[in-house]
Image (tube, grey):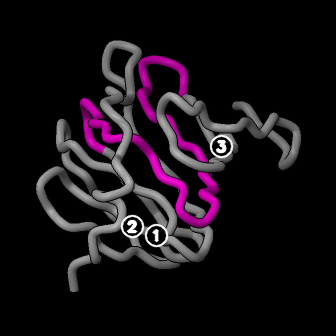
Amino acid sequence: MDIHKFGTRPRTQAPAEYFTGDVWQDPVVTAPEPARLRALIVTFSAGARTAWHTHPLGQTLHVMSGEGRVALRGQPPRVISAGDTVWIPPHEEHWHGAAPDTEMVHMAMQEALDGSAADWLEHVSDADYAITPAG
């Protein structure tokens, strides 16, 4: 059993090659094999977001605070708020991040396949980010 006391593991700034804006990541778990679970608490400043990406085994997002956006390729963004949980199936091209005027914090949970939990694509354009969210 491993117990990681709150505040004992370093918070890291998410890499600019995969994120737009200020984004911070706090580790929750990277389970050792044969388990595959990886989870992070991700804090997005207002307007910050991921690049387009996929997950080989899917991803679950649980919004902890604030308001955000999540979008599948070819669809308008959808609003997500504190308490919402989002399941994104394997290989679905998507992005997620904060709303334009408020920060958003979510827990991101995904499983690794052959050591990889995400496949990163291009950055989300400002025009794609600015699309009015669907209902």
Q: Quadrant of the C terminus?
A: bottom left
Q: Is residue 72 left or right of residue 43?
A: left
Q: Residue at x 48, y 52 (%)?
A: 49
User: Residues at badges 1 and 2 in contact (C-beta under 8 Å)?
Assistant: yes
Tell me: residue 44, above or below residue 132: above
| Residue 22 in picture, x, y percent from top left | 65, 49
The magenta stretch is 31-58
Q: Is residue 54 left or right of residue 62?
A: left
- Looking at the rendered structure, the kind of residue marked 3 is Gln
| Residue 122 in picture, x, y percent from top left | 32, 33
Q: Name the residue tied to disc 1.
A: 68
Label drawn at residue 81: none
Q: Name the residue tied to disc 2.
A: 69
Q: Name the residue tied to disc 3.
A: 25
Nearest to N terminus: mark 2 or mark 3: 3
Nearest to N terminus: mark 3 or mark 1: 3
Cα distance between the residues tagged 3 and 1: 16 Å
User: Residues at badges 3 and 1 in contact (C-beta under 8 Å)?
Assistant: no
